[in-house]
Amino acid sequence: MANPDLPRSAAGPNSPWLLAIIVSIATFMEVLDTTIANVALRHIAGSLAASQDESTYILTSYLVSNAVVLPISGWLSNVIGRKRFYMGCVTIFTLSSVACAFAPNLGMMLFFRVLQGIGGGGLAPTEQSIFADSFTPKQRALAFAMYGITVVTAPAIGPVLGGWLTDNYSWEWVFLINLPVGIVSLGLTWWFVYDSEKVKEDRRKLLAKGLKIDYVGFALIILGFGVLQIVLDRFERDDGFSSPFISVMTAICVVSLVALVIWELIVDQPVMNLRLFRNRAFAISNIVMFTFGFIIISTTQLLPQLTQDLMGYDATTAGLTLGLGGLATIFIMPIAGLITGPIQPRYLVCMALTGTGFALWHTSGVDLNISFWDVSLSRMLQVIWLPFIFIPLSAVQFIGVPPDKNPDASAIINLMRNLGGGWGVSVATTQLQWREQFHHARLVEHVTPYNGYGYGIDLSAIARAVTTQAAILSYLDVFTLLSVVAFLLAPVALLLPRAEKGAAAGH
């Protein structure tokens, strides 16, 4: 029997905990796909006769379309109907995944990756909206702990699974693995997920007003966020602002996003509800979520890259260093969910950001003599704090948000996490290049023909050692930078509002 206190619940007569498991399946599939293709990129490029530089568009095309759909997914969910929109996203994502596996050339691969990003972009916001509507405030922290396991562990498992599938089968299975998962998700959603009468009534009221499509908002979102993702992806490879392409794209991005903010605040039916930022809990939650993405996604790329480039790890072993950290979060997530009630979320988030800062500071002191287990331990120290960011934040981010605006709020929060990840990867990649050049120049100053010359030491070996040392120092500098970001943000978390036990959603 449906809970009368949760008129927007998607569980219907079923247990909301069963619902939590069902809607997490597609999230795991989508989040997994953001990292699973990374380790197979060289194999995909070779099969499609694409250069290494061209192959990166396989990742970028997905991220661009994903970034465009995320901010409008809340509006689309309200207009189309939440269950219908969700199942449509799962269908598009699954079919385009299969199409990617059979793409005959790079052009078709990019087209199907764009479709895949469109389908994937609507999943997480809709699912978070379902969670917020289907659980009481007392249950919400533990429910989001279940959901958080998929969000945090999937990026860690992705490189391991992608490397194993590529090494033992073929890169096509990186995409084909989504087919059975998608079919299961669609079947269970059809049978067990409901659009409540309240959700249907809200949709009817919206359509009865006369649907005014925000074409200007749509255009500015596509232009602003699409170009932003391109700039973030190509900034380092195109040599930053010294590139006319990057400079022009940045100008277009800034103008588009500024215009978007102004337009969405004055239009009657905005496609992206920026008025929600007037709510303190929501605004601060987005700041923290942006930093969450900035740190976790950039470190997810940095560690495998370091171990493969400088320590000689293969793709599978490099992925395992992340996978062990992902296993640690599985055990920590329920604990974070249980203590979020007794302990105020703002204190937990502040503690977690401080702990993350110390973990990254520890990583900034490693060297190339560390073992596989040392690298894995370093990763574990970083990610054990993530549940204490994600779960408490999930408990407070909807405070003050009207229940019928939950889809809009979820869309923006997920967008901020993805934008944070894009910024994090771009900043980390750029800093690696700049700091390596800096350290290389400083180290070369101390290398002369007399350093070992005459003692049978090959100068070319010294040059290789200098290059390797400069590279590892650049990685350590980036980890130091990320630790400073975590330390600086920790006090901001204390501005989050107090979560009252039993407070009604949207109050």
Image: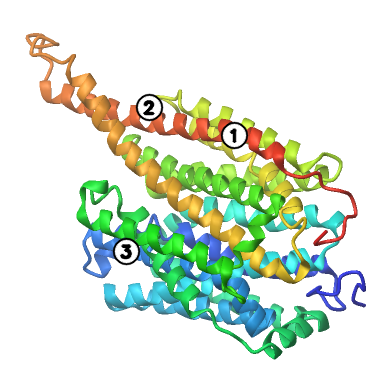
Quote the CA–CA distance across marks 1 and 3.
Answer: 32 Å
Of 181 and 500, nearer the camera is 500
Residue at 64% of width from left, 37% of height from top? Answer: 492
* Kind of residue indicated by mark 1: Thr
Q: How many marks?
A: 3
What residue lies at 26% left-to-right and 50% top-to-bottom? 237
Q: Are marks 3 and 2 in contact (CB under 8 Å)?
A: no
**Secondary structure state at the residue bearing disc 3:** helix
Residue occupied by mark 2 = 368
Q: Dot 3, how many residues are within 10 Å of its Cα: few (below 14), some (14-19), or many (20+)?
A: many
The residue wearing badge 3 is 57
Instruction: Report the amino acid beneath label 3.
Output: Tyr
- 3D distance between C-alphas at marks 3 and 2: 31 Å
Residue located beneath label 1 in the image: 356
Sequence-wise, the earlier of marks 1 and 3 is 3
Residue 25 visible in the shown view: no
Residue 307, image x and y in percent?
Answer: 39, 38
Above or below residue 58? Residue 269 is below
* Precedes in sequence: disc 3 or disc 2: 3
Residue 35 in sight in this render: yes
Q: Position of residue 500 (x, y in %)?
A: 87, 48
Give the colouring mode of the picture.
rainbow
Q: Is residue 207 above or below residue 218?
A: below
Q: Nearer the viewer, mark 3 or mark 2?
A: 3
Position of residue 465 in the picture relative to residue 261 (left or right): left
Please report contact status of discs 1 and 3: CB closer than 8 Å, yes or no: no
Helix, strand or loop at disc 1? helix
Q: Residues within 10 Å of mark 2 (few under 14, many from 20)?
A: few
